[in-house]
Amino acid sequence: MEPSLPEISVVVAAPEGEWEPAVRSLLRQSLPPAAITVVTPADPPPDPRPSFMRCASETAAEVCVEAARAARTPYVAFLHGRDEALPDWLRHLARAARDDAGLVQCGTLRLRADALVEGITLTPGLDGAAYAVRRDLLRTRGHRAVRVMVPRLLVRRRTDDTTATASAALAAGTCLVRDTHLVPSAHAPSTDASVRRQAPDLVSVVIPVRDGALTLPAQLRALASQTYTAPWEVLVVDNGSTDSTREVAEKARPDLPGLRIVDAHERPGESYARNRGIADARGDFIAFCDADDVADPGWLAALAAAAPDADLIGGSLDSSVLSPMYADEQPAPMTEQTDFLPFARGANCAAWKDVLTTIGGWDESYRGGGEDMDLSWRAHLCGYRVHYAHDARMHYRLRAELSGLARQKWNYGRSGARLYAAYRHAGFERRDNRTVLMNWSWLLLHTSDLARSPNLRRRWIRYGARLSGFLAGSTERGVRYL
């Protein structure tokens, strides 16, 4: 039985007149708001559920503070008019506020106009955060109170909101920060009970590919040999191929009647191609694989079997068949990952389509690595279940050419620094100084490996490229991730 939670009223800042998205999301909260007040210059609809306070665009900030002070609940939370709060937003704020916190914040998913993710905001600062304040502190000065950051992404926020909207929504928080001595406090959000889903009605398999004519046939033959018997389709998403990739896909139609070719030539990038696949998919459950790997016959059946108990699923990668000479580079399974939260690798994963839509799909600004960690971590922090299906095995191909390997590992290093900059306030920790020193010392001490043997040279290049990527990413992001 959950202890009693403080009541929270919500003020919706809508100086541009658009408030319906925020109110709709508030009416779906697992912990209903005690009251909703919309601050807007627009005329209220007949018989509105929320109450309205009229304002001019330039006075919206003052009216938002006035609405908060007039509330009858211990806490008041704030949203932009076009925000969409996830169903447990208020419940998480109330749990964090239970010990008389003065300010409670949570992270936001920043979405582009097309509803795809642009990034996340998860920092101790007010800018970009969604938050709640203890109402009595808005009428006093000089008090001491606790400031709590809930390390969750609980609000979907459009990045094209006007300055007037942001300023109005931030007004009460700005007053509180100015007039109250706030002491940071850690908060571990509780895990809500999982809801079991039904089996998928239709599974869509999305394969992003660019110039994959040499390897795609083996993957398509493997998919044609799947043991999964329920309805499914295959989408080959052509990301601007200049070889015979499309012809290869067309030849596979007799063995894969549900195969479709999706054009995604407008800009390069696996994440862009995957998002195009999501948009075109007819299935309610979407699996992702690469064109240069080979699915085990039971791959899709294992992912679909795990689907009712999970929201996003990662499968296993086995390099022993396609790259047997590089056994020491076998990717670690999710159960052995040590970076922050477990993540599903892009070469072998699946998710419900509504989950992918809610979290904004794949972040297209990640190039060359890190996008799968970002997708999984966003899902985790939105409260979704990220599980591992060991039996969903994909035969994985490792880079053979040293130039391609170096480029891949360098990109992974750059992405690591970017991920640290984005997720450090949620608990992603960088390596300690001792580990950093040991890593760089090893690289210097083993420089002679470059001239000793192909295997030792490959190992040195893998480590060196990744550490160099850490340096480059740290410089780009203004963080220390070495």
Image (cartoon, rainbow, N blue to C red):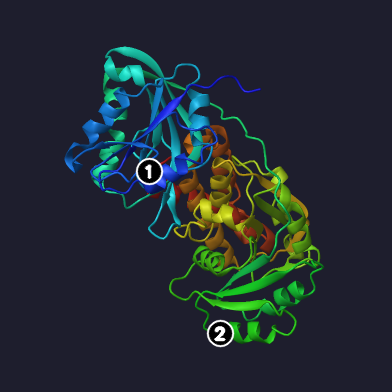
Q: Quadrant of residue 287?
A: bottom right
> Is 341 above or below relative to 464?
above
In terms of depth relative to the viewer, which is nearer, 46 or 247?
46
> Judging from the image, what secondary structure is the residue with disc 2 in?
loop
User: Is 214 on the left or on the right of 65, as rendered?
Assistant: right
Query: Which of the numbered marks, if any, corresponds to residue 478?
Result: 1
Quick check: 88 left or right of 184? right
Q: To which residue does mark 2 refer?
A: 243
Q: What's the distance in space between the residues labelled 1 and 2, CA to CA?
A: 40 Å
* Residue 451, label in figure: none
| Rendered residue at 78%/58% (across/down) | 302
- Where does the image place residue 467, in percent across and percent down from the top left? 52, 49
> What type is the residue that disc 2 sits on?
Asp
Write the residue at 73% across / 85% down: 254
Reading the chain from its start, which is encountered first: label 1 or label 2?
2
The percent coordinates of residue 313 (x first, y second) are: 68, 52
Compared across the picture, whether 216 is left or right of 123 comes to right
Q: Secondary structure at mark 1?
A: loop
Q: Is residue 333 visible?
A: no
